[in-house]
Amino acid sequence: MSNELDLRQYMTIIRKRLPFILILVLLSSAAAAVFSLFFKDPLYEASTKIIVNQTQSQLTTGQLDLNQINTNIRMIDTYKEIIKTPAILDKVEEGYPELGLTAEQLAQRIKVSSVNNTQVMTLVVEDTEYRKAAETVNAVSKVFREEIQHIFKVENVSILNEADPTREPGPVSPNVPLNIAIAFVVSLMVGVGIVFLLEYLDDTIKTEADVLEYLDQPTLAMISKMGAEDSGQDQSRKKANKPYVRGELERVTVEK
């Protein structure tokens, strides 16, 4: 029974300050939408796929070496780290000055991923311009294909697909619906937390139940607050109960 009472009290507290919570949620959601649409620069994403395949000797003989394939799969994690090292990115900076990016800037923009138990890597680059993102990811892929052969003596690294700079895809960021949803949830939690905090800090006594709970004393009497209408009705009631006085003109009516 006490749990039901506590839940009822919580709902009463929320209902009492519901306008505050709604205003906070609406303002936060609107601010997230405005920021996402007008103040955050859109980001475009371009990607390529690279496969570390069989050696040239295996391709010539037509034989599949399962151990070699497993080794190539395990080496993918190593290749993912090598792509972001100066051994590759310094070459990109030197060979493609038109990109205007340093090795450190390239390392921050490149994302490398792979599917488990495959020899395929995916390179992704994000930029405020899709053409530049496509040109950057293509440049990194080509330099990696050339340099990895000297670093690990890998004989067959292929680029499965290159990014097309002529495409006009939509931006991948900002995600306006997602940002609004996040702002809605966070502001709702913050609003409810503020409401309970204000209720916790409010130590004033407002009802008979508060008197009994905090003072352990019964309520003897209550003074009600009178409004303007109540005051007017009280004055009319006093005039109606006032005795007649001879010569008084207030209650005299004239018939036509």
Image (cartoon, rainbow, N blue to C red):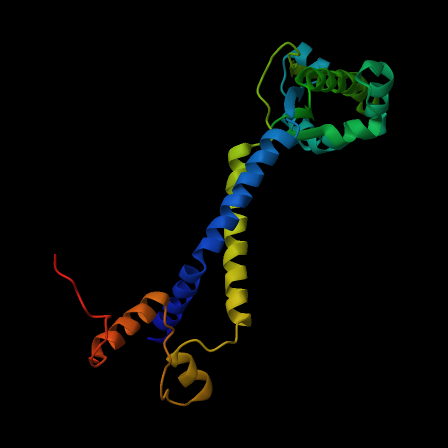
Q: Nearer the viewer, residue 43 or 119?
A: 43
Quarter that holds the N terminus: bottom left
In the image, residue 112 above or below residue 222: above
Please tell me in which quadrant of the rendered image residue 76 appears: top right
Q: Position of residue 252 (x, y in %)?
A: 18, 68
x 84%, y 15%: residue: 97
**Residue visible at 63% across and 12% down?**
62
Between residues 241 and 26, which one lies in front from this camera angle? 241
Q: Out of 238 and 177, give the one closest to the viewer.
A: 238
55 in relation to 84, above or below: above
Picture residue at 65% right of the left edge, 26% below the top: 43
In-image side of 96 versus 185 (left or right) = right
Image location (x, y in percent) of residue 126 = 68, 26
Look at the picture and state if 249 lies above or below 129. Answer: below
Percent of width and height locating residue 137: 71, 20
Q: Is residue 145 above or below residue 223?
A: above
Query: As rendered, which of 202 and 248 lies closer to the eye?
Result: 248
Q: Is residue 78 left or right of residue 202?
A: right
Q: Position of residue 124 (x, y in %)?
A: 67, 25
- Residue 46 in view of the camera: yes
Along the horizontal axis of the image, is 3 left or right of 59? left
Q: Is residue 115 visible?
A: no
